[in-house]
Amino acid sequence: MKETNHLGKRRKIIDGFEKVTGSAQYTADVSLAGMVHARPVLSLYPHARINAVHAEAALAMPGVIAVLTGHDLNRGRAAPSRSRMILALDEVMFAGQPVAVVVADSEARAADAAALLDIDYEVLESVDDAEQAMTDELLVWPHGAPTADGSMASLHGGEASEQNVQKASNIDQQRVFERGDARAALGSAHVVIDRQYNNAWVHQAYLEPHAVVAQPGVRPGQVTVYTSTQGQYTVRSEVAGALGLRERDVRIEPMTVGGGFGAKYGILDALVAAVAMHLRRPVRMVLSRSEDMLTTMPAPGITTHVRLGADAAGQLTALDVHVVIENGLFSFGHAGIIATVIGGMYRCENVRIETLEVVTHRSPTGAYRAPGVPQALFALESSIDELSRQLQQDPLELRYLNAVETGDLTGTGQPWPDIGLKACLDRARQHPIWRSRGQTPGEGVGLAIGGWPGAFSPAGAVCRVDTDGTVRLHVGSVDISGVHSSMVLIAAETLGVEPEAVEIVQGTTDSGPYAPGSGGSQVTISVGGAVLDASEQVRDQLVDLAAVQFEAHREDIELVGGQARVKGVPGMSVGIGQLAQRAQRQAGGPGPIVAEGRAAIKAGAPGFIVQFVRVQVDPDTALVTPLEAVAIQDVGFALNPMLVEGQMQGGMAQGLSIGLYEGLAFSGGTLTNPNFLEYVFPRADNLPPIEAVIVEQPSVNGPFGARIVGEPPITAGAAAVANAIRDATGVRVTQLPVATEALWRLMQASPN
């Protein structure tokens, strides 16, 4: 790639000033004339019949406007997914399901009145976990689970869920991905690793709770929704579907997002829109932390049984995986994502992956950054680590021997496009942490690999030049990670202007060019391609105008420093703003300088990563202290290295947290730690320094060779922690998060 002026350089994010000064506008900051405040009342029970809702005391409170139930808002529509649920009607299906909404003239009065609402429940028997779901005759959906159009997993690069085959079952989906004969190959393998691994449910732990403001339109049947969301077009579809509206009558205004990690695709939007349309008034709902954790969509609990076979040289000969995904009330579609990755990290001719998606009376689960992959790779990479020990081989070299390359198959049988996993392992081989391991008693170094195939979708963008030389990019994507700052660099690089001269205009569903949701690490390669296309068209328009003005060949025109100039001829230059002004005023001329770019790539730009963790384990207490962490990731080309490093460090911090700290706790079907006091995640002093090492193996599909960045960093951290603990103590943990007491018991029982 030729030398660049702006791309590949460290640049601050374009909205950093607004965020650090507190002037960025979040949904909770929206205030509309006549706006009222809504507070949900959530079910206390995982399964119960609603005999009556007694609202008299709540309605008698000062400032209370209404108490609404499903009989007021649902209009007989069944909910096939969490995002299309309004309120429970006659039966609650999970603890945390919204049963009623109290509306008042202030948040405080709405909360006080909600506490007085008296709901008469008849508690029913519930299916509380996956084990009960698969063995008990009690069915969550006796008449078959409702099905949605498509799958939320497809927004993140997974396969769409299949239709239910067995309607009356708590196993909502059972799928098998297979090539060769894994079970026969296991029988003839030189060594077999056979282990089961368990992962707790995990919450995304974003700082900003879910928040929605809805305003009824001028005409009945219209609504505008201001929301913290990763995908405005997805929310529009979900709200329209839930309320029986035309999509054209639902307008989504995406606000600044205070963290999402896959969780913000419209959980409350239909409910708040329904309240606003019912009352004909603007309504705001901002969840408390406990409400958020009770009623939203965490990552599922996953149990993975891995049987792994290899020959004496360490070549994998068989992989047999059985995965049980505890989805809660609705199926999500993790299976295809998990199968793609767990069966696609290593070359193996004989692979069988069976996935069971199980429903229970718990809150529906959803996406959390690389959905299902950290859990799957905890199981796979722990088994690979054990295999290397059984064979007495270097764990990095064993991985290098078997690592997939371009054209090798994923777990679902599709060939990988160009990938750079081995380039990451090459870099890892030389790292000081790896080369110096094994020198300090009580310390261990763990290695794991990870990756993400990445979603990709068609997208559009509009680029125009104003008469003052400002370049404006109109996009429909939502910026959750600084990605719009990279779009600015693409336009600046293409048009020869400073990044400060480029302005992003984020459109609504009415005004923005179509863009996919900000999930699956797809915005850079999807929207970035459209921005590049639009910028190149504008560049051509500017060059043509300058060539006519200077009576020069267009090949002799260059765009530099916000000007079009003739190469090698001092003084023959003109500002791009002046060109725009002339184009707009010239009768019979070319017209305004504007272009619509489009992109629809045919394949993704997968990202792979190698992660190290060095830990210390106290021999007396089993307390695990992470000391150092390293993420070595192939990003293709780092459009903005500062942002890339931030993604790598943040994702690895989350992976370490899944390994050591985070887990939702349940008593039966009821969540017992729905707050940040009892839900444990790391503070700054619980995390080690995280080194980000960028590898650049350009992708043929991403703009300027860029690959996906956001998902891979979370995928291998938990596995690396588990392998580091094994290296330090000699015992293998098979359940995450690593509980200190459980690890202590393993250490006491170990003969090492």
Image (cartoon, rainbow, N blue to C red):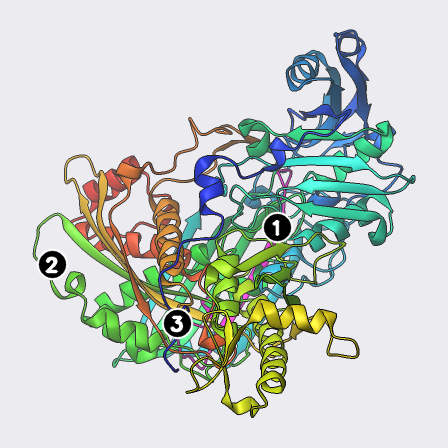
User: Is residue 275 shown left or right of residue 475?
Assistant: right
The answer to whether any part of residue 518 appears in the image is: no
Q: Quadrant of residue 94?
A: top right
The answer to whether the residue labelled 2 contacts the one labelled 1, judged by CB atoms less than 8 Å apart, is: no
> Mark 3 or mark 2, which has the lower sequence index?
3
Q: Quadrant of residue 121?
A: top right
The residue most toward the right is 220
Q: Position of residue 45 (x, y in %)?
A: 65, 26
- Magenta residues (range): 342-364
User: Is residue 463 shown left or right of residue 607?
Assistant: right
Towards the viewer: 251 or 463: 463
The answer to whether the residue labelled 3 contacts the one labelled 2, judged by CB atoms less than 8 Å apart, is: no
Residue plotted at (61% across, 50% down) = 358
Q: Nearer the viewer, mark 3 or mark 2?
A: 3
Q: Position of residue 444 (x, y in %)?
A: 18, 53
Give the residue number, with chain letter if any, for mark 1.
Answer: 358
Give the residue number, with chain letter if any, for mark 3.
Answer: 5
Distance of label 3 from label 2 (alpha carbons): 44 Å
The three-letter amino acid code for the residue at tag 1 is: Val
Q: Which quadrant, please, contains the N terminus?
A: bottom left
Give the residue number, with chain letter if any, for mark 2.
Answer: 438
